[in-house]
Image (cartoon, rainbow, N blue to C red):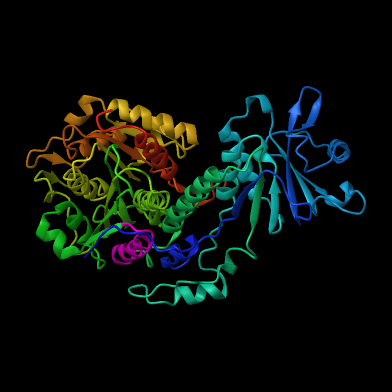
Amino acid sequence: MTTQPGQPIALDPAQIYSALPNRGTMPTIDLVAELPADAEVDTLIVPVFQGANGLELAATGSGLLSKEQEITLWRVLTSVGATGKREELTPVPGELLATEGSAPATKILALGLGDIDDSTDEDIRELAGVASRAAGLGSKVVSSLGLISPEAALVGHALGGYRFAGFKGASAKNAASQDAAGQDAAGQDDAAASDSPVTITVLAREADAALLAQAQVDAAAVALARDFVNTPANFLYPETYANTIREIAEAVGLGVEILDEKELEQKGYGGIVGVGKGSEHAPRLVRLTHEPSADNEAPQVALVGKGVTFDTGGISLKPGANMWDMISDMGGSAAVVATMVAAARLDLPMKVIATIPLAENTPSSTATRPGDVLRHYNGLTTEVLNTDAEGRLILADAMARACEDEPDYLIETATLTGAQMVALGNRTPGVMGSIAFRDKVAELSQEIGENGWAMPLPPELGEALKSDVADLRNISASRWGGMSVAGHYLANFVTEGVEWVHIDIAGPAYNTEGAFGYTPKRGTGVPVRTILATLRHLAGTTKGG
């Protein structure tokens, strides 16, 4: 079934995303150069730092506080032992700063920046996120962090304020009782996730409408990816996931094509069919197309994201401990869908086509076995030695199909290997592929704070994928270099001449520890912002440039 690209329906983003059975909440963000004199403020966030002689106020003279109030605030903070160290939060009753019976806010929240001379935009994003996660902010918040970096403050406050309550409470009970095969819970009350809507108004030197709009769309895209990743697999399996993607994509004017299990088998998508055939939830392939509203000379880009909605390991069954985290094994697909929604909303001046394979990997009498051979969309065959190395099997088909569109660049992302976490930890994506493009993507990722790191594809590791009975085997016999081995495997499905990158987000897509900076527990939304930064960069280039 195919829907051609068209004009987006004029919907509020919250309505666009209503196809999900339950959604997280995120603050509304605004950017102003001046607050109205009669503005009601529950919490005023004031940055402070560690100066040479102790605590100092940052961004003074903004007009939010008079000189007298700034002095009073400094005295109160020093009297209670505040130092301005990084992430230190010191609440001060607003009444202590009242003049002529009027307080600037119900509460002042002093936010420690640490050493301000060493602060980067990413530091400001993280600290804005820390402030947004503070308890008792109220619904009307004003932040003067934008006087230091408007973009960083906007993104950090929005993403740091994200909450996903899941299926707690009476409103969620209704969602959990829906027939997940055909019903959604559009319009569900978000009371379980937030007591009341929160607006964070960021004060800056200039109210840049374009900057605000971009930050709003980017943050909403990250939140959408987080929502997908956080949704349990009994709600989000290939069929329901594909249907949800369709509803969201059509609302923003993206073209949509969905292949079901019969079409996948007929067209030769052996990797996707092979991974998905052990589950009662049949696989799907979703294709999304963004056509820019005006002609341009920008390169065409293909996006591919792994969508294993739950991964038991198949016949090569995973250990039971922490298997519940495998609801996140579709994190790459979530990032790609969210990026496509943002591309449509921003009308990025380039053609972008996403190819998204969806499957559930479970053991059964019909599941693929170790030793089976699968034939992929481009004709290559793979000997499956371990059914828990399934992501690369579905990506192989999707990447081969994506290359049929003759893109100039291909960006693929997946929660692919535990080796990524062994090599880089759980916060640093590994970036592999065409060397110059790989390095640029890693550079952009570091600039926006997702911290992708360029990794090599040593030739000898590719030799380990030779099979006696097929073109490839899906794992190496060696324990070494597993992340790069997977990258080598995927390289076989990229057409010569296409610049490509593989972003391994096995750790960074899902935070199993406590919240930090602007990153919540569970779904993180990585690498949405990396891909968007790359698309913006490529939109400023020309084909062959």
Q: Main secondary structure of the magenta part?
A: helix
User: Foreground: 369 or 54?
Assistant: 54
**Residue pushed farthest right?**
100
Q: Residue at x 77, y 22 (%)?
A: 52
Say left or right for 52 vs 497: right
The image shows residue 59, relative to residue 387, as above or below, that is above
Say left or right for 343 vs 521: left
**Residue pushed farthest front?**
294
Res 147 → quadrant: top right
**Residue pushed farthest top?**
52
Q: Residue at x 68, y 50 (%)?
A: 134
The image shows residue 310, relative to residue 212, as above or below, that is below
Q: Residue at x 69, y 31 (%)?
A: 114
**Residue pushed farthest left?**
469
Instruction: Report whether residue 476 is seen.
Output: no
Q: Position of residue 227 (x, y in %)?
A: 46, 58
User: Foreground: 237 or 340?
Assistant: 340
Q: Residue at x 89, y 38 (%)?
A: 68
The image shows residue 295, relative to residue 368, as above or below, that is above
Res 253 → quadrant: bottom left
Q: Magenta residues, as a range?
A: 237-254
Judge whether residue 323 is colored magenta.
no
Q: Position of residue 358 (x, y in %)?
A: 27, 57
User: Foreground: 486 or 528?
Assistant: 528
Say left or right for 136 vs 4: right
